[in-house]
């Protein structure tokens, strides 16, 4: 007995779901030269009815990828059906290039989408009134004369509305015919002013409207970027002990409630932004001072959120600096009163890059390369000597608190580098000159950056290095200038930055 009922249930299930299976794989067998008529392999046994309206949809991704998206191709109506195929008139084609012979399509037909729904029932009434009062009488009739009791509303004020007006009737709707009085001699008779459509025609229009709404809602949901099949199937999953109850309850978790609130807030924020853009500079004319203060505060918060999202999504990876440096110490001697160099400064071009972007740890490290023109001085055998340097450096920086692209935040960094170049050294009091190669290994620096919204920034830093000089050319023999020298140098550097 138990096996018998299982077989009966299986047969019923196959009969009910058969059309749905067939509709999921309709193949285009052919198309007319005009492109307005199409032949699909859907027949009578696939649940299609003659005269059906349908929307032909193209699957643009595989269902196995869990991210299926559907594109409407055309609106169609069935004009002929056989056991194995059917002919459809494509009365509105959205994209003719998607109609390719031999490919599969999903046909969302009227009979399948509205299966199980009963046709709406309508009543019909006739409103007979004077021609000049027709609009008022029809409105009063459709509103069930709710305004007639309110003629004395000044004497009977409304204190509180407990619920909206409810109308219960057997019909789903009412079709209204409007007739007026005409007079001929002493006789009065009714003459038609407006005739509602026939019930069958109106029912057909309403059915097609409902069908299009269902298809639109389905396509909008499936094509929503936030829609995920895994989450959708998880919500519909049944319990292991029974196939009649959902595994999950209808109550939302705290996290789901939080996401819902955030989504609603995002919609409200978008409406606020849209209203500001539409009204232009006059958007605030309807606000009081208190309301305007509140709205400006909210707009400021929204701008900060958008700015943070933009910075995270599109960080500036490269930065150029133009720096001016001043020397801390003075290595010149007071014994050489004939010459002393007071203008000791440097001009530096710096290029910095983030090798690995959007990584929580690695994005804190940057590499940089510089060119420097440095003018300084030092003492050699009681003579002051000027040093004009041209050098290049290569280094690494570490930003411990924020990434280097953080906007409107104090960004602290530590770094190290090596420098190499050449220098010209002159001792004016002794009348001597020599050329040197230059090497600094290593140099250290520390400082702070501040980036503005317009990609411009400022940088203040301090550096410490020892310049190792090795002479390769001299002007006289027995020069007082050394063959080798070590010149310690500390600098305070101020730079203007541009990030991109």
Image (cartoon, rainbow, N blue to C red):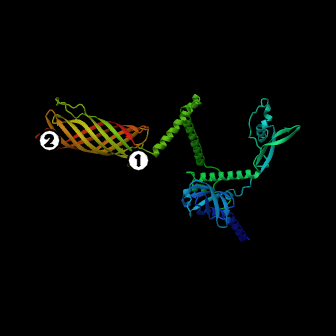
Q: Is residue 391 above or below residue 58?
A: above
Q: What residue is shown at x 19% (from left), y 32% (from top)?
A: 333
**x then y, percent, for residue 271:** 58, 40
Residue 377 visible, this orientation: yes
Q: Would residue 366 appear left or right of 155 to someone viewing this image?
A: left
Mark 2 burial class by Cα count in 10 Å: few <14, some 14-19, many 20+:
some
**x then y, percent, for residue 160:** 74, 35
**Where on the picture, by quarter, is residue 24?**
bottom right
Residue 146 visible, this orientation: no
What numbered label is drawn on residue 474?
Answer: 2
What numbered label is drawn on residue 155?
Answer: none
Spot the residue most to the right: 186
Q: Which residue is mark 1?
A: 363
- Compare residues 349 and 27 and report the one nearer the observer: 27
Q: Is residue 17 above or below residue 377?
A: below
Quadrant of image for the N terminus: bottom right
Q: What residue is shown at x 21% (from left), y 37% (from top)?
A: 387
Task: Assign a secondary structure to mark 1.
Answer: helix
- Compare residues 494 and 33 and report the one nearer the observer: 33
Dot 1 or dot 2: first in sequence order is 1
Q: Would residue 500 appear left or right of 146 to someone viewing this image?
A: left
Alpha-carbon span between mark 1 and mark 2: 47 Å
**Where on the picture, by quarter, is residue 102?**
bottom right
Q: Count up the numbered dots.
A: 2
Task: Assign a secondary structure to mark 2.
Answer: strand
Spot the residue most to the front: 185
Which is more foreground, mark 1 or mark 2?
Answer: 2
Spot the residue most to the left: 477
Q: Would residue 470 appear left or right of 457 to someone viewing this image?
A: left
Mark 1 burial class by Cα count in 10 Å: few <14, some 14-19, many 20+:
some
**x then y, percent, for residue 413:** 37, 41
């Amino acid at each position: 007995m138990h096996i018998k009922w299982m077989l009966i249930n299986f047969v019923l299930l196959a009969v009910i779901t058969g059309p749905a299976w067939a509709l999921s794989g309709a193949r285009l067998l052919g198309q007319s030269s005009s492109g307005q008529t199409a032949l699909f392999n859907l027949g009578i046994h696939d649940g299609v009815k003659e005269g059906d309206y349908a929307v032909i949809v193209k699957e643009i991704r595989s269902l196995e990828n869990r991210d299926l998206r559907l594109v409407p191709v055309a609106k169609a109506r069935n004009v002929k059906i056989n056991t194995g195929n059917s002919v459809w008139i494509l009365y509105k084609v959205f994209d003719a290039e998607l109609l390719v012979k031999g490919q599969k399509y999903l046909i969302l037909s009227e009979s399948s989408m509205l299966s199980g729904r009963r046709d709406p029932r309508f009543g019909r009434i006739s409103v007979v009134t004077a021609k000049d009062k027709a609009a008022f009488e029809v409105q009063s009739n459709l509103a069930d004369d709710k305004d007639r009791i309110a003629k004395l509303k000044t004497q009977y004020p409304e204190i509180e509305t407990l619920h909206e007006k409810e109308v219960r009737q057997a019909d789903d709707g009412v079709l209204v015919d409007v007739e007026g009085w005409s007079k001929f001699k002493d006789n009065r008779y009714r003459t038609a002013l407006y005739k509602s459509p026939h019930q069958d025609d109106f029912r057909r229009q309403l059915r097609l409207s409902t069908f299009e709404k269902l298809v639109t809602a389905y396509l909008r949901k499936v094509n929503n970027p936030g829609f995920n099949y895994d989450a959708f199937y998880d919500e519909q999953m049944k319990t292991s002990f029974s196939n009649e109850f959902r595994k999950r309850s209808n109550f939302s978790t705290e996290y789901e409630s939080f996401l819902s609130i955030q989504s609603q807030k995002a919609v409200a924020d978008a409406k606020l932004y849209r209203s500001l853009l539409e009204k232009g500079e006059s958007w605030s004319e309807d606000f009081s001072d208190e309301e305007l203060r509140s709205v400006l505060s909210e707009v400021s918060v929204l701008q900060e959120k958008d700015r943070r999202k933009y910075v995270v999504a599109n960080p500036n990876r490269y930065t150029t600096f133009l720096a001016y440096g001043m020397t801390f110490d003075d290595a010149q001697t007071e014994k050489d009163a004939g010459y002393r160099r007071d203008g000791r400064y440097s001009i530096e071009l710096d290029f910095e890059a983030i090798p690995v972007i959007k990584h929580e740890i690695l994005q804190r490290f940057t590499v940089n390369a510089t060119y420097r023109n440095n003018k300084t001085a030092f003492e050699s055998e009681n003579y002051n000597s000027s040093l004009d340097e041209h050098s290049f450096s290569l280094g690494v920086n570490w930003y411990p608190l924020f990434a280097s692209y953080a906007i409107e935040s104090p960004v602290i960094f530590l770094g190290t580098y090596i420098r190499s170049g050449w220098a010209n050294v002159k001792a004016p009091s002794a009348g001597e000159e020599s050329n040197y190669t230059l090497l600094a290994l290593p140099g250290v620096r520390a400082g702070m950056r501040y980036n503005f919204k317009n990609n411009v920034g400022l940088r203040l830093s301090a550096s410490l290095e020892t310049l190792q000089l090795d002479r390769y050319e001299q002007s006289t023999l027995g020069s007082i200038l050394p063959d080798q020298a070590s010149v310690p140098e500390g600098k305070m550097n101020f730079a203007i930055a541009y990030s991109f």
